[in-house]
Image: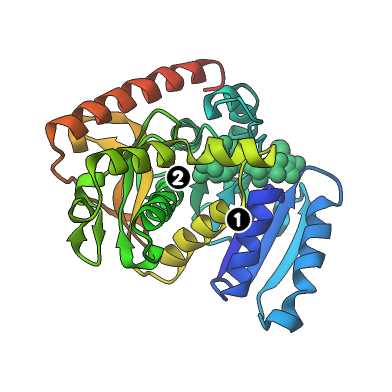
Amino acid sequence: MKVTIVGAGNVGASCADVISYRGIASEVVLLDIKEGYAEGKAMDLMQCATNTGFNTQIIGVTNDYSKTANSDVVVITSGIPRKPGMTREELIGINAGIVKSVAENILKFSPNTIIVVVSNPMDTMTYLTLKATGLPKNRIIGMGGALDSSRFRYYLSKALNKPSNDISAMVIGGHGDTTMIPLTRLASYNGIPVSEFLSQEALDKVAADTMVGGATLTGLLGTSAWYAPGASVAYLVDSILNNQHKMIACSVLLEGEYGQSDLCIGVPCIIGRNGVEQILNIELNDSEKEKFAKSVDAIRNMNADLASVL
Ligand SMILES: NC(=O)C1=CN([C@@H]2O[C@H](COP(=O)(O)OP(=O)(O)OC[C@H]3O[C@@H](n4cnc5c(N)ncnc54)[C@H](O)[C@@H]3O)[C@@H](O)[C@H]2O)C=CC1
Ligand SMILES: O=C([O-])CC(=O)C(=O)O
């Protein structure tokens, strides 16, 4: 199985690292516009092979899309990340043009591929990719919910003082500081509602910390995070390539689900070899519905800014 990752920067390289280390794909192509950069990242990663024991072949190329031909999955991480104090939405001006041209180039050589969109503002970049390529909706998947849900589980694990892997929790809605919806009502510690163990105040703090999880890391690191984003993309790619049918919150085109159409937003999906195999239209309570509607409005406003590139 072949995976191309466009953008060999922090997230792209970290994703290649996890994919190869875990043997998720036999071939990874890293492509970047910066001369020699992807080649260097690929060489560095390949020099891990003997000490970590993987067999994936990683190659790096500078803007040579012919080397990406017949990729099963393409991950788009190209574009700029935010700096402390910025929102993801502020990246649209530069990233929209990059994502659109990358998606068009990819399709020339991998017409049957599934595209995973990572570049921010991710929900709008996913919508742009869908509109620019005209691909069926099951083949365009925005990655944000996998990461936000892992952060939600991290903050719950800290509040509970229990391992993250014993916690089940999901974040839906937009991948933005104010648009995420951590589904606290449905979160559980080994099947027991977390509200059995944590006060409403503590749960509210966990939700608030989760929503600004990316901004917190950006403030600490000076650029946005990459280890958990890279691992989250690899988790999603694994479910696609190995047909795992995992339930993962992904940004996908809605056509009536949750009462919405013509936008991409994070909702629970079943992810397998055909990409989005199913969208789960779960029943939200009134407060969750209200948050979802606000998130939809914010994403629609952002999508309106695509008029100049579409
Ligand atoms: N959806 C999510 O959950 C997450 C999204 N992100 C987003 O992912 C993107 C990448 O973040 P980082 O890897 O930290 O940035 P980075 O700056 O480390 O890497 C981006 C790479 O894209 C390359 N690039 C730029 N234009 C290109 C083009 N036209 N063709 C090919 N390569 C091109 C750059 O040369 C650079 O190497 C950002 O937009 C960031 O906001 C980051 C983390 C999580
Ligand atoms: O925070 C950012 O800008 C990058 C990102 O999407 C994340 O780490 O969630």
> What mark, if any, has residue 285 been given in the picture?
none
Q: Is residue 2 above or below residue 259?
A: below
State ligand 2's quadrant.
Answer: top right
Q: Amino acid at mark 1?
A: Tyr
Q: Is residue 206 above or below residue 167?
A: above
> What mark, if any, has residue 144 been given in the picture?
2
User: How far from the left and from the top, in percent, is residue 173?
Assistant: 33, 36
| Alpha carbons under labels 2 and 1: distance apart | 14 Å
* Nearer-the-camera pick, 257 or 214: 214
Q: Which type of secondary structure does the marked residue at label 2 adopt?
A: loop
Residue 264 sits in quarter: top left
Q: Is mark 2 within 8 Å of ligand 1?
A: yes
Front: mark 2 or 1 = 1
Task: Work out which quarter of the rendered image holds the N terminus and state it.
Answer: bottom right
Q: Is residue 77 above or below residue 259?
A: below
Provide the residue designation for mark 1: 227
* Nearer-the-camera pick, 309 or 268: 268
Q: Amino acid at mark 2?
A: Gly
Q: Residues within 10 Å of mark 1 (few under 14, many from 20)?
A: some
Q: Which type of secondary structure does the marked residue at label 1 adopt?
A: helix
User: How far from the left and from the top, in percent, is residue 117?
Assistant: 51, 44
Q: Residues within 10 Å of mark 2 (few under 14, many from 20)?
A: many
